[in-house]
Image: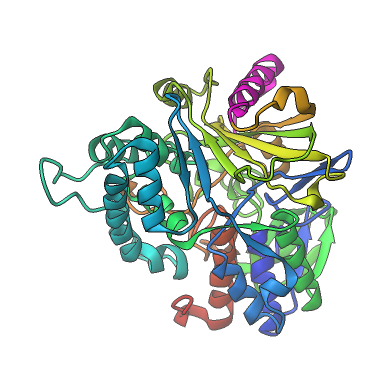
């Protein structure tokens, strides 16, 4: 196993239970991949995702790898309200968790009568797209014939002048929602998953459908606590881990993968090799292929995106009534889209503010930790700097704009601020080998947003994790582990999760 990310560990635990001896080689000194942790002065922050969606994926893992269910290993807390949205005109919408009727009522109350109905109608069409693609895009191996998934499953409205299907998510928002604030809400879901709304297909409407149908959850202690639990489950199933141990090359023998060469030159034989590290880095470094990075089987359509994250250490207790997640929408969405397309940093981005209110993450009850995130153009992985990240003044200016936006969500923020820690796509590149954050698989876009298939071109080699089918995010990475374990244990007869 190359890498100890969430998808790789999910595969490792399942394979160990199936009777395989599993060894994991991770070049970093810890596990979890993108689900990392930053600690300072008694504060702790998730450096990757902050919320969990589709927890059933991880419940399935724990049920099938032992008698101890997920909820005995981590505490899952339903996030309600799911999100608070603040718009530039002063409007506010407080969206409940996993309640269609509640969401309709909240949008009507915050944005005016009819807003909820239009949003609900859009989600009904998104449900059609979800039901058409859920199994092939989440629960089954990618089929050999990708042409059905290359077509966008999002249906056109059935009435009026809108019977022609929208080509992109941004077009869906303009044509079908009738309110720039609703359009901004829709585009935020795409941005939060790492997609440029201008180029993302209309099928990206499944992202808000998924969250608002199945809910948002917080893992007590931060999402890193889930990584801890998965690691401990692997250890309990006798998976072996070697940290600080990189893999230099996959060994090929008789036309199939037969082991790996470690960074120190040692050769480890294996019946199967599972690569869980980011594919751009593996291809660029010739670990899994002798050709250059252009051979990497996944290329993101549109603007490659990453994230700027600002961790804030605050004095003073968290307001007990504060929303866990607040989205402060940009007053200039057109400028934000232009900056994203041009690979620059906008003046005032849309900022997601996470205030978990978790005593495990702060030194005491008189302090609060807050995380801000904004989606940005990630830059070229093969370039010298991958965007503006070498310009410290530009980065600090952008972080300052994020903090200014967050003041609307956290009253008195600047007076309470002790320190801040800024993370950019350059940090992502240093840790993973790519500036980008992969999103989940989406149908449409001529197949450009379908990740690499789990079986690699070289027999005996498999891809797992966010850069492989079914794509990025904790739930999708966990599902990739289930798919790879099924392909190895059941072979060509494996038809996916049931």
Q: Indicate the position of residue 79 as horizontal and vertical percent values.
A: 58, 55
- In the depicted view, which residue is nearer to us: 73 or 164? 73
Name the magenta segment's main secondary structure: helix
In percent of the image, x 80 and y 77: which residue is there?
236
Residue 248 seen anywhere in this rendered image of the structure: no
Confirm whether the magenta stretch covers residue 328. Answer: no
Q: Indicate the position of residue 345 as horizontal and vertical percent values.
A: 55, 21
Q: Is residue 115 above or below residue 146?
A: above
In percent of the image, x 48 and y 39: which residue is there?
191
Q: Residue furthest top?
A: 393
Q: Which segment is the magenta one?
A: 381-408
In percent of the image, x 55 and y 70: which residue is there?
56
In percent of the image, x 42 and y 49: which residue is there?
449
Confirm whether the magenta stretch covers residue 399. Answer: yes
- In the depicted view, which residue is nearer to us: 62 or 185? 185
Marker count (numbered): 0
Position of residue 179 in the picture relative to residue 480 (left or right): left
Position of residue 211 in the picture relative to residue 49 (left or right): left
Q: Indicate the position of residue 14 as horizontal and vertical percent values.
A: 65, 76
- In the depicted view, which residue is nearer to us: 360 or 50? 360
Q: Residue furthest right?
A: 41
Q: Is residue 62 above or below residue 225?
A: below
- In the depicted view, which residue is nearer to us: 480 or 287? 480
Residue 267 seen anywhere in this rendered image of the structure: yes
Q: Where is residue 143, by image quadrant? A: bottom left
Q: Indicate the position of residue 442 as horizontal and vertical percent values.
A: 40, 53
């Amino acid at each position: 196993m190359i890498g100890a990310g969430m998808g790789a560990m999910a595969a490792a635990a399942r394979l160990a239970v199936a009777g395989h001896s599993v060894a994991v080689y991770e070049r970093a000194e810890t596990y979890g991949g993108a689900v990392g942790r930053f600690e300072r002065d008694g504060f702790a922050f998730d450096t990757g995702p902050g919320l969990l969606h589709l927890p059933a994926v991880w419940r399935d893992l724990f049920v099938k790898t032992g008698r101890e269910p997920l909820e005995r290993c981590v505490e899952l807390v339903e996030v309600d309200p799911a999100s608070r949205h603040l718009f530039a005109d002063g409007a506010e919408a407080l969206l409940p968790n996993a309640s269609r009727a509640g969401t309709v009522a909240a949008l009507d109350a915050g944005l005016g009568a009819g807003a909820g109905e239009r949003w609900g109608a859009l989600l009904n069409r998104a449900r059609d797209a979800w039901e058409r693609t859920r199994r092939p895009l989440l629960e089954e191996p990618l089929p050999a014939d990708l042409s059905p998934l290359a077509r966008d499953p999002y249906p056109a409205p059935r009435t009026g002048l809108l019977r022609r299907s929208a080509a992109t998510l941004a077009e869906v928002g303009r044509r079908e929602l009738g309110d720039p604030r609703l359009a901004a809400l829709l585009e935020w879901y795409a941005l939060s998953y790492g997609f440029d709304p201008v180029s993302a297909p209309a099928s990206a409407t499944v992202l808000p459908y998924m969250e608002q149908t199945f809910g948002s959850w917080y893992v007590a202690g931060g999402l890193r606590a889930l990584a801890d639990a998965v690691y401990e489950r692997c250890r309990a199933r006798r998976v072996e881990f070697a940290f600080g141990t990189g893999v230099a090359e996959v060994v090929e023998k008789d036309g199939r993968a037969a082991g790996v060469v470690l960074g120190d030159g040692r050769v480890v034989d294996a019946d199967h090799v599972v690569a869980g590290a980011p594919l751009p880095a593996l291809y660029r470094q010739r670990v899994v292929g002798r050709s250059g990075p252009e051979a990497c089987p996944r290329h993101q359509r549109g603007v490659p995106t990453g994230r700027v994250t600002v961790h804030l250490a605050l004095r003073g207790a968290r307001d007990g009534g504060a929303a866990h997640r607040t989205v402060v929408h940009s007053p200039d969405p057109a400028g934000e889209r232009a900056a994203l397309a041009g690979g620059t940093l906008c003046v005032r981005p849309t900022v997601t503010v996470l205030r978990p209110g978790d005593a495990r993450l702060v030194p005491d009850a008189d302090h609060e930790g807050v995380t801000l995130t904004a989606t940005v153009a990630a830059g070229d992985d093969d370039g010298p700097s991958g965007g503006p990240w070498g310009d410290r003044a530009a980065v600090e200016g952008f972080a300052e704009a994020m903090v200014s936006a967050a003041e609307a969500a956290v009253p008195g923020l600047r007076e309470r601020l002790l320190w801040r820690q800024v993370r950019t796509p350059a940090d992502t590149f240093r840790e993973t080998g790519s500036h980008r954050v992969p999103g989940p698989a989406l149908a449409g876009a001529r197949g450009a947003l379908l990740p690499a298939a789990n079986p690699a071109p070289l027999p005996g080699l498999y891809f797992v994790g966010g850069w492989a089918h079914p794509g990025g995010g904790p739930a999708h990475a966990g599902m990739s582990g289930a798919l790879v374990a099924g392909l190895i244990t059941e072979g060509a007869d494996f038809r996916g999760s049931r």
